[in-house]
């Protein structure tokens, strides 16, 4: 398949008064045309920082130290800023985590989508309104509701509006940044179903950022696991579920309830993600790993191939 986004050796640091936070270290992955890729990890593992780096949305004191993020032959990390601004929305867009904060409370939802279309495309206002009504309908909102204000919508409906807005300029790539966090379980399922349906209808390439492993493995073709700023495992969904290699991946799966096995006892991963201002030497997971070895405390494991399409950064495993 064609690769629509290739990220190589991304390093992002935050320069604080207390020291340098190594938020993202040597992260590489790619997104294929028409696929949904899950980016998984606990809070503080660097998932959102990866996306902010790619889209050049980092603010001081954050800085991309090195790496590449190539889309359509353009390195997003080094291209002129005016070129990046033209690519946002039209080629790559984001569904934000909190639609409540993303939507302007004093504008109708329709006007906000129309504004985005007019800003990035040469169309008439009537054409923008028609597209807005179409987008609202495909995410399950009656087109006449374009004249409603955000406060007139439920949380789930606001999130649908945010999805419609992300699709306003017909992008190739959509990044869903924890877009169901804060919603109830039923509404989460409805929003994810909308995203999955749109992916098929519009041949979208989607990066789904989440800490919800069951949801991601249910709808994504491939999964990338991040821990403490590093990519620790990269596999197809079936490879991850059937043969997880990294102890962190194994721990996440062990902590996941299984409705097909009600006798399963979920086990939490002890400890917390380390502070990246002073990360552990060697493997960053070594302070929580049940299988830690002496060399894990001294050497940094490199990403190695387990089988076709399956890679892991660990000294253990086959």
Image (cartoon, rainbow, N blue to C red):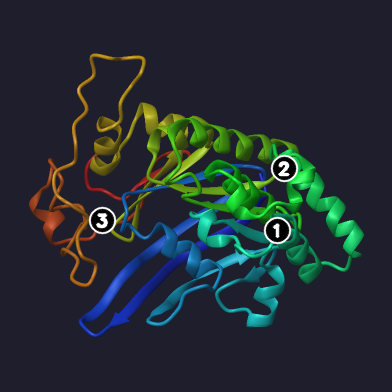
Q: Nearer the viewer, mark 3 or mark 2?
A: 2
**Tag 3 near tag 1, CB within 8 Å:** no
Quadrant in the rendering for residue 6: bottom right
Looking at this view, is 303 or 222 the one in front? 222
Give the spatial CA distance, label 2 vs label 1. Answer: 29 Å
Please indicate, yes or no, whether residue 185 appears anywhere in the rendered image: yes
Secondary structure beneath disc 2? loop
The answer to which of marks 3 and 2 sits earlier in the sequence is 2
Residue 195 x/y as whole percent:
61, 40
Give the spatial CA distance, label 3 vs label 1. Answer: 51 Å
Looking at this view, is 212 or 141 the one in front? 141
Residue that protrudes farthest toward the left in the picture: 294
The residue singled out by tag 1 in the image is 108
Q: Which mark is residue 301?
A: 3
Looking at this view, is 272 or 226 the one in front? 272
Secondary structure beneath disc 3? loop
**Which residue lies at the image location 33% right of the left edge and 61% below the top edge?**
229
């Amino acid at each position: 398949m064609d690769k629509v986004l290739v990220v190589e050796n991304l390093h992002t640091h935050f320069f604080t008064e207390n020291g340098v936070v190594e938020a993202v270290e040597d992260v590489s992955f790619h997104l294929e045309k028409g696929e949904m890729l899950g980016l998984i990890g606990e809070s503080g593992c660097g998932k959102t920082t990866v996306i902010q780096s790619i889209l050049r949305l980092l603010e001081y004191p954050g800085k991309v130290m090195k790496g590449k993020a190539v889309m359509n032959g353009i390195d997003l990390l080094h291209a002129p800023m005016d070129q990046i601004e033209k690519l946002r929305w039209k080629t790559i867009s984001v569904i934000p985590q909190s639609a409540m904060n993303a939507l302007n409370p004093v504008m109708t939802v329709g006007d906000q989508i129309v504004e985005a279309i007019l800003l990035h495309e040469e169309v008439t206002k009537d054409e923008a309104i028609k597209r807005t009504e179409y987008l609202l309908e495909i995410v399950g909102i009656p087109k006449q509701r374009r004249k409603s204000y955000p406060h007139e919508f439920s949380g789930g409906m606001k999130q649908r509006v945010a999805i419609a807005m992300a699709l306003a300029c017909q992008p190739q790539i959509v990044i869903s940044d924890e877009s169901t966090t804060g919603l109830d379980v039923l509404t989460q399922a409805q929003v994810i179903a909308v995203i999955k349906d749109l992916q098929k209808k519009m041949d979208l390439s989607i990066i789904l950022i989440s800490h919800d492993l069951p949801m991601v493995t249910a709808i994504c073709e491939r999964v990338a696991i991040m821990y403490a700023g590093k990519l620790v495992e990269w596999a197809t969904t079936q490879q991850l579920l059937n043969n997880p290699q990294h102890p962190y991946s194994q721990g996440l799966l062990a902590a996941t309830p299984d409705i097909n096995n009600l006798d399963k006892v979920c086990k939490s991963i002890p400890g917390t993600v380390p502070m990246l201002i002073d990360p552990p030497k060697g493997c960053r997971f070594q302070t929580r790993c049940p299988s830690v070895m002496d060399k894990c405390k001294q050497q940094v494991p490199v990403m190695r191939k387990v089988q076709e399409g399956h890679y892991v950064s660990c000294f253990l495993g086959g």
